[in-house]
Image: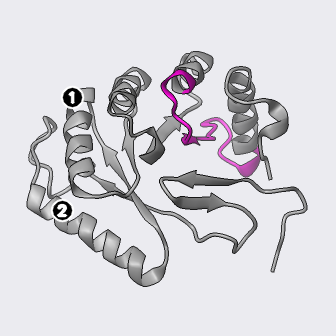
Amino acid sequence: MFRFEKEQKVFDLNGIKIGGQPGENPPLMISSMFHNKDKIVQDRKGNFDRKRAEEIIRKQEELAGITGIPGMVAMVANSPEEAKIYIDFFLETTDMPFGIDMWVAEQRAKATEYVAKLGVQNKFLYNSITPWDKDIKGQVQKLKDLGIRHVVVQAFDDQDQTPAGRMKSLESLLAQGRVTLIPPSSIPLS
């Protein structure tokens, strides 16, 4: 089996081991709920079919148990108020980790503050730092201040959508966030 020569980091997301050498830990399945046109969503004010949403979560838990592939849910929200409703529901329903999927950095920040206020940072995956965010350094510092440890970094270059373009985007994002987040020597790039 293929192995990386460089040491690989293993991260703990609410008891789920992520990373390491290939085959060391199973992949993490991230499902999505409350996205646009999701049949359980009644409106973007946080009204949804709670019974059906719980059934979907239970099914994911069941599949994780059968397959050994751990799961989490990324909940799509358009506003911090909507995100709070989903977060409260999710925390009442399951122990799985979760993420909030929001396009606007300022809105994501407010939802993330709520996560920190609840003290559930260990269950939370911040989605995401993107190349089009205006203040990446400030965003990274805010995440650090809130105790957020798990972050998706979305490497994308709309001018160059090749793997080389994605690498260029990733290097730019890491350079902007590196100063306040973690020292360069501890960033696993392979």
User: Image check: 31 left or right of 146?
Assistant: left
Q: How many marks?
A: 2
The colour mode here is one colour
What percent of the width, then of the height, locates residue 46? 14, 39
Question: The N terminus is located in which quarter?
Answer: bottom right
| Residue toward you, 147 or 98 | 147
| x 19%, y 47%: residue | 89
| x 58%, y 24%: residue | 140
User: Image check: 18 left or right of 8?
Assistant: left
Residue 85 at least partly seen: yes
| x 27%, y 48%: residue | 91
In the figure, 186 relative to 15: above or below? above
- Helix or strand or loop: what does disc 2 sit on? helix
Amino acid type, residue under disc 1 in the picture: Glu
Q: Quadrant of residue 118?
A: top left
Residue 34 at least partly seen: no
What percent of the width, then of the height, locates residue 98? 38, 50
Q: Is residue 152 magenta?
A: yes
Amino acid type, residue under disc 2 in the picture: Glu
Q: Main secondary structure of the magenta part?
A: loop
Q: Is residue 72 magenta?
A: no
User: Sequence-wise, which precedes: disc 2 or disc 1?
Assistant: 2
- Which residue is label 1 attached to? 81
Magenta segment: 144-164
Residue neighbourhood size for the residue with mark 1, other residues' Cα within 10 Å, grouped as few (<14), some (14–19), many (≥20)? some
Q: Mark 2 and mark 1: span between their CA atoms? A: 20 Å
In the figure, 89 relative to 131: above or below? below
User: Image check: 50 left or right of 152?
Assistant: left
What percent of the width, then of the height, locates residue 165? 72, 41
- Which residue is label 2 attached to? 54
